Image (tube, helix red, strand yellow):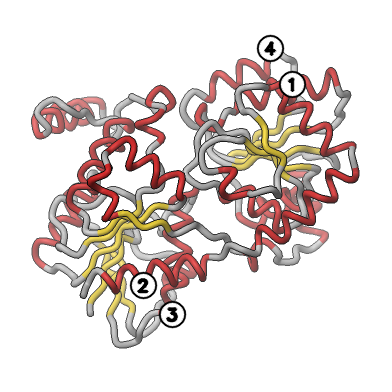
Amino acid sequence: MVIGIDASRANEIRKTGTEWYAYYLIQEFKKIADPNDQYILYSKEPLRGELAELPANFVSKVLGWKPNLLWTQLRLSWEMFFRKPDVLFVPAHTIPFIHPKNTITTLHDVGFERFHELYSKSSIGHKIPFSRWLINIFIKAFTLGKYGSNEYDYHRFSARFALKHAKRILTISNFSKSEIIELFGKKFEQKLRVILNGFDDSRMNKVCSDYDIDQTMKKYRVHESYLLFTGRLEEKKNISGLIEAFYILKNRYKYEGQLVLIGKEGYRFENAKIKIIEYGLQNSVIQTGWITEQERIILLKSADLFVFPSFYEGFGIPPLEAMSVGVPVVASNTSAIPEVVGDAALLVDPHNPEIIAESIDSVLNDGVIRDNLIKKGYVRAKQFSWEKTALETLKEIVRISH
């Protein structure tokens, strides 16, 4: 059997959630794949780093010809037209127009349908304004005016196309499954399978040298005491609410530490920047931007507390990573987060900065609460692994081919 995998996201240099999901699944597939099956990894560019280290039954296929836009719908579709594999797996919900009948994809969440105001409506695609305009006209014409070339519409179109045409739809939590059924219809329930995400425990617990720790702290001007958030810095993640909670924590509860934000800037992060200036927190809020995995792990292990106040998550890996290294977690009581963290985190209303601040203070200053969360966190984190996720995913890939 020939199994094709869209490895374009896994091959990104600066990975975030979906890219890491694709990367770790492929890495685990290499360990457990039937040697009699052939795997083809499709990408825009040559595979990088450990991803490029392939077993004998894995091959890389770079679809790198022009044009450099709409890679999935143009180049991958072209490849599927002439050389379809027996099964195609796409680790995000954008499947090519032309695809095998046995196509399986992962729809991580449908926040773009539930909270459309939290997603950018700005154009995506080519950097040249005229080209963006031309692409937008083409897409509007192709979809009879239903969609334009922006992030929000791209999510909406891709999800509907995948639900209609993929043979199997994976999703990463029971919450996301219920959302998909509620928003798109019960008719898709038979296509849906829930396979929970994992995380890389071995990488999280890798020992870092004192020199690397010291250099990381100096590089980002991080002091001994700080709270940590990791993820895209955008409105969906409630960064503005976190800034307000941090201000309350410093002024009402006299917290003297910093707030460290790890991640790329996203939609409406400028609102959080305004609050940082308004509250005079320029020297207390550290924004690192994208950093290396080693730097991220160093900063996570040394944090006083990990805070995850998102409005909407299809899963939420960062809290599990924090738990695995003994950092207590305060997280939202919304969407899939309670399903992921169980009783191993202190859950709060993300719409209430005062409650967030009060909860953080209780964890920082009540040793019983803190120790209890840390103990439960270790236990909870051990229930998740990429090995388990990959085993269940590969079973579904093989199953739909029969």
Residue displayed at 40% across by 22% down:
117
Q: CA distance from mark 4 to mark 1?
A: 8 Å
Give the residue furthest to the top.
278
Instruction: Name the residue carrying label 1.
Output: 281
Name the foreground residue: 205 vs 132: 205
- In primary-sequence order, the first of circles 1 and 3 is 3
Residue displayed at 23% across by 37% down:
157
- In primary-sequence order, the first of circles 4 and 2 is 4
- In primary-sequence order, the first of circles 3 and 4 is 3
Which percent across, then down, holds residue 334? 56, 35
Instruction: Name the residue carrying label 2.
Output: 395
In this view, 255 is above or below 375 = above
> Do the residues bearing badges 2 and 1 touch, measured as CB atoms within 8 Å?
no
Q: Label 4's element?
A: helix
Quarter assignment of residue 159: top left
Q: Label 3's element?
A: helix
Q: Nearer the viewer, mark 3 or mark 2?
A: 2
Q: Nearer the viewer, mark 1 or mark 3?
A: 3
Q: CA distance from mark 3 to mark 2?
A: 11 Å
Instruction: Name the residue carrying label 3.
Output: 32
Instruction: Name the residue carrying label 4.
Output: 278
Q: CA distance from mark 2 to mark 1?
A: 50 Å
Task: Name the kind of residue labelled 1 in the image.
Answer: Leu
Q: Label 2's element?
A: helix
